[in-house]
């Protein structure tokens, strides 16, 4: 039985779908983030509570397994719950179901608490460890994604817009996900949906930055890509990801 889980009911809006009327991976991750915000707030360790003490939450790693993307106008139920602590990182899982109760997507994530002034990681609250008894939504261990070492056939320059900035005054994580997808060929995004996404967030980006988005195909028989985001004129990656795409039927 889940301890202190939270559920929110949503309807897929027209601005959250692609040209095929399917919920985008960015929108799905936004649903997860929204549910996480509400759950943490209800348990009194949300963004507002942390901000009062000069701290905030930052997403560090995320894995999303999409069984089928919900369609425009479809009602979805997003459930989330904390799943304990791994060293300096708090863990949280997600489940999205349709009106019939069938799973449409699952997710696992890790978060850190940072000092707003120093922008450094601080230890999360000790009481979060009690949620380690909660079951995981999917058996997947969040891992470090290696740098993209081979030449990328696609590189896009993307300027950080005001709309990309969140309450932490840096680029929101879903904007990073959108930018990674922007570097993919049109035919990949137009004929497929993102079946799996795994992403590591490593550095912040801010208003006025230019971000380079790199994407290189992974030759394993699937439609899969290795991604990297990097602030212009910097050598270190701001984020890395692996995506796998499945044909729309």
Image (cartoon, grey):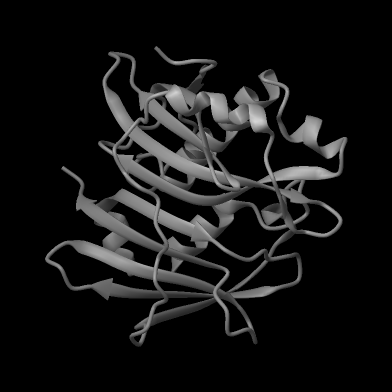
Q: Looking at the rendering, which quadrant does residue 101 occupy?
A: top left
Above or below, 72 relative to 77: below
Q: Is residue 178 visible?
A: no
Q: Nearer the viewer, residue 62 or 187?
A: 62
Image location (x, y in percent) of residue 17: 43, 41
Above or below, 182 relative to 214: above
Image location (x, y in percent) of residue 187: 27, 64
What is the quadrant of the N terminus in the image? top left
Q: How many marks?
A: 0
Q: Looking at the rendering, which quadrant does residue 165 occupy?
A: bottom right
Q: Is residue 27 visible?
A: yes
Q: Nearer the viewer, residue 193 or 244?
A: 244
Q: Residue at x 43, y 31 (%)?
A: 94
What is the quadrant of the C terminus in the image? top left
Above or below, 39 relative to 217: above
Q: Residue at x 43, y 23 (%)?
A: 134
Q: Residue at x 37, y 25 (%)?
A: 135
- Horizontally, residue 24 falls left or right of residue 92, namely left
């Amino acid at each position: 039985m889940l301890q202190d889980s939270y559920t929110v009911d949503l309807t897929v809006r027209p601005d959250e779908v692609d040209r095929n009327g399917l919920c985008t991976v960015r929108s799905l991750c936004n649903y997860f983030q929204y549910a996480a915000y509400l759950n943490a707030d209800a348990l009194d360790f949300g963004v507002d509570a942390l901000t009062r003490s000069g701290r905030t939450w930052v997403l560090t790693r995320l894995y999303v397994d999409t069984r089928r993307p919900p369609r425009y106008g479809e009602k979805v139920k997003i459930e989330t719950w904390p799943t304990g602590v791994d060293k300096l990182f708090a863990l949280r899982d997600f489940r999205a179901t349709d009106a019939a109760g069938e799973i449409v997507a699952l997710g696992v994530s890790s978060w850190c608490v940072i000092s707003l002034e120093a922008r450094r990681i601080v230890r999360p609250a000790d009481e979060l460890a009690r949620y380690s008894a909660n079951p995981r939504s999917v058996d997947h261990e969040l891992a470090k994604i290696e740098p993209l070492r081979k030449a990328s056939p696609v590189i896009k320059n993307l300027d950080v817009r005001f709309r990309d900035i969140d309450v932490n005054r840096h680029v929101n994580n879903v904007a990073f996900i959108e930018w990674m997808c922007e570097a993919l060929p049109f035919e990949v995004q137009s004929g497929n949906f993102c079946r799996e996404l795994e992403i590591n967030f490593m550095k912040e980006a801010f208003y006025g930055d230019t971000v380079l988005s790199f994407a290189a195909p992974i030759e394993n028989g699937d439609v899969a890509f290795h991604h990297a985001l990097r602030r212009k004129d910097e050598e270190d990656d701001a984020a890395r990801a692996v995506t796998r795409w499945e044909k729309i039927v």
